[in-house]
Image (cartoon, rainbow, N blue to C red):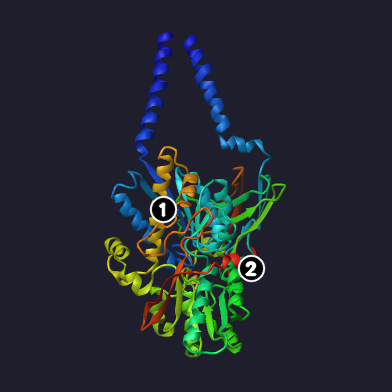
Amino acid sequence: MRKKCLIFLSMVLTICFSIATFSSSSSAKEVAYLSLADYTGPIAGLNVPADMGLEDYIKEINAKGGVNGIKIKFIGIDTRYDVARAVSAYKRYRRTKRLLMVNSISTGIGKAVARLIERDKRAQLVPGDGEFQAHLGRNFIWGPAYQDAFAATLDWIIDDWKAKSKSGTPVVGYLSWDNPYGREHLRGGKEYAEKLGIKLLPPEFFPPGTLKHDVYLTRLAKAGAHYIHAGGVDPTPTNVIRDAYALGLTKKIQMTTDYWGPTALGIGVHAKALEGTAITSFFERGTDAMKNKVPTDLWKKYRGSLDKYNEVYGMGMSWGLTYVAGLKAALKAVGYEKLKADDMYKAYQGITGFERLGIQGPCAYSPTSRRGSLEVKIYQVKNGKIVPIRGWRKAPDAVSLHKF
Amino acid sequence: MRYFKIIILFVIIPGLVLGALACQTLQSLTGPKATLEIAPAEIFLSPALIRKPVTFKGSGFAPKEMISVEMVLPPGLKMKGITEGEDVGIAVATSDANGNFTAAMGPMATLNWFFQVGWTPLLKPNFKEARPIPPGVYTINATGLDSDRVATSTLKIVPPPKKK
């Protein structure tokens, strides 16, 4: 009997030992990054190249042995811009070992997932909602807030107005998507316009998917707009300006856009209509982006010819650069074995000033800032190309002007 | 024999007890039974679902928790954007103080997962690229994201009525 017991005990121990050995050998040192993205839905046109930039950068890091020998696992989920799908995908992946960062590519998704992020003591990246700066939490925006960028556009408008020797103050029209993103710019942006003495016309909102924007544009033109700021994610602003051009409005009204304004995507289709459009951007675009050797070389290596290069590829790469900087800081603080998502949240607050190859301004994350960077650059479409007309400048803090 | 008893007493029984305590499924069973109702329980695919979407009503969840409503895809059914074996989220809600919730499928979810439309550069659904999911009985799960409580029901999709 004793012999039987010993055999049984040795079998149990052997199985346990085998499981332990298998688990440790199969789990190489790895950390994860989850992108709740849109690859086949309405904003895929910009999201796909952005995630390509991030994924290629991670491939490159992993090919060189990872970060201190730790490989990064990129998990890209196609939400098709749907909040329910994004929440369900987060539910599926939230228990992934060492999932250090989630990038929610939609203001709506970011807001829905934020509660779970808080509960899981994790951090998430979200587009540009100023509310995340007003109420500091675990949500980091990619660059300056939407309202900050809009305020920078208003500064440029004043300068442009003066440069054209016009008297009085300019009248500005605003039209954008009828959703939280579309309204966000005005939560602080409106107050900034008042501060500058700019007359901001009652905003026009339209549902995403609107075919023609003539009604809204005509209303703003009739109200006396000298400038019209067209919101939405490219190609929407491109299509708004296409309609303004067809109505003959671009001859007398200066069109402006936010950082989701025309990229290579819009220029490729409506270059003539976009001529003269001013774009406020927190990341390099147009000719600047084409001159930046590191992202373009990475594109050539993984994607081939630059014919289809879109500047948001560099922005995606910038997410990767920031993630690696955060990872290095987190590893320095706690080491790999103790590394938790909360350590990455803490690390992101300590990488203030981190430079990202000039793709965007220095990292502005800190214990009191959730802004990815503070600077914007003004570009203009000239001769079918997006060229810089003003260097990097710190965008005004419009978030603090609004009561959230 | 004594060794065997020792193993049972000190290894197997504590192991089973600890395992059971850690098991979230069992934990979720300790609360009230979660339920899910779908209205209507039987549909056919038509644009009317955008205006009058499928709705979900649940109870027995933890108070104020997020609920993810998911459709289980049968093996072999390919869906745009979904990896095989994955469930697809079709609605999301937050339970009230009593653990009850109601949710409706948003237009985006109906277009993406029932009709599987394409999207034009103008952000308009492209029905030319649509691949509507086939008729059948689909399992729907509602999961509490804090409590891990799961309620299950079914949604029957029938072929559209023949035009007279």
Frontmost of labels 2 and 1 is 1
Mark number, residue A323:
1
Using the image, tell me which numbered label, if any, was put on residue B134: none
Alpha carbons under labels 2 and 1: distance apart: 42 Å
What subunit carries mark 1?
A: A
Three-letter residue code for mark 1: Tyr
> Badge 2 local density, few (<14 within 10 Å), some, or many (20+)?
few
Residue B84: horizontal and vertical position, in percent? 44, 52
Image position, residue A376 (x, y; %): 45, 70
Q: Image point 60% across, 89% down: which residue?
A: A222
Q: Nearer the viewer, residue A359 or B158?
A: A359
Query: In this view of the protein, which residue sits in the foreground, B131 or A383?
Result: A383
Locate residue B22, reporting x and y percent. Answer: 55, 33
Disc 2 element: helix
**In terms of secondary structure, where does tag 1 sit?**
helix
Q: In the rendered image, is residue B124 in sight?
A: no
Residue positioned most to the right: B98
> How many marks do you count on the picture?
2
Kindly identify which residue carries mark 2.
Answer: B51
The chain to which mark 2 is attached is B
Q: In the visual, does A383 lie left or right of A103?
A: left
Which residue type does callout 2 highlight? Arg
Residue B110 visible here: yes
Where is residue A281? Give x, y as percent: 44, 71
Q: Nearer the viewer, residue B164 or A135?
A: A135
User: In the rendered image of this protein, does residue B157 appear above or below residue A402?
Assistant: above
B55 versus B30 height, above or below? below
Circle 1 Cα neighbour tier, 10 Å, few/some/many (<14 / 14–19 / ≥20): many
Please report the residue visible at 52 percent of the width from the left and 81 percent of the height from the top: A158
Do circles 2 and 1 both sit on a common chain? Answer: no
- The C terminus of chain B is located in which quarter? bottom right
Q: Nearer the viewer, residue B119 or A392?
A: A392
